[in-house]
Image: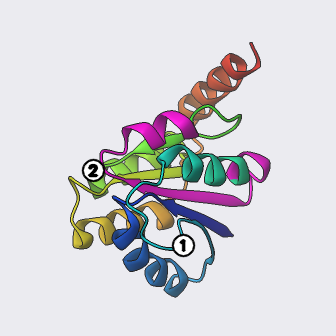
Amino acid sequence: MIVYIGADHNGFELKQALIPLVRERGYEVVDVGNERLEKDDDYPVFAKGVAEKVSAQYEGARGILICGSGIGMDVVANKFPRVRSALIHSSDQAFDSRHEDDANVLVIPARYVDAEAAKLIVATWLTTPFSGEERHARRLQEVYKLEEQ
């Protein structure tokens, strides 16, 4: 599975710390930027870059986005079909986002989550499967119907 990862200036350092962890877990990592710390970059560029890839490959790809609050990236990512982006602050939320909602984009708020917590969040999120329970699958189908409207 491919994991696309992107961050603005607020999440750049955390992104650099998370890439090796994702690779160590056996995933191919594609860094969609920013490639260097640039104080005036704009989060929509990176959120779009990750979300477009996940939207096009929603069965075989996931995405990780990192910015200051996480809110802007989450909003942008959820504009794309078949993207289920989740703004996560804890490993418990990471588990729920995968187990119940089959989230395929993880958004981490760098201002509120330190590197160690982020590593636990990512590890949990990557290893938690979707439960496939009827009620969760039914709800996802309802979300897909909304996207089609």
Closest to the observer, 90 or 42 = 42
User: Residues under labels 2 and 1: Cα distance?
Assistant: 25 Å
Give the residue displayed 51% in from the left and 82% down from the top: 25
Give the residue displayed 68% in from the left and 69% down from the top: 2
**Quadrant location, the C terminus:** top right
Closest to the observer, 48 or 1 = 48
The tag on residue 89 is: 2
Judged from the image, the secondary structure of the residue bearing numbered disc 2 is: loop
Give the residue displayed 69% in from the left and 26% down from the top: 144
Give the residue displayed 54% in from the left and 43% down from the top: 44
The tag on residue 35 is: 1
Q: Is residue 142 left or right of residue 16?
A: right
- Counting from the top left corner in percent of width and height, residue 147 is at 70, 22
Q: Is residue 18 left or right of residue 139?
A: left
- Counting from the top left corner in percent of width and height, residue 143 is at 62, 24
Q: Is residue 94 left or right of residue 58?
A: left
Dot 2 amino acid type: His
Q: Nearer the viewer, mark 2 or mark 1?
A: 1
Dot 1 amino acid type: Glu
Segment tinted magenta in the rendering: 54-77
- Counting from the top left corner in percent of width and height, residue 10 is at 33, 58
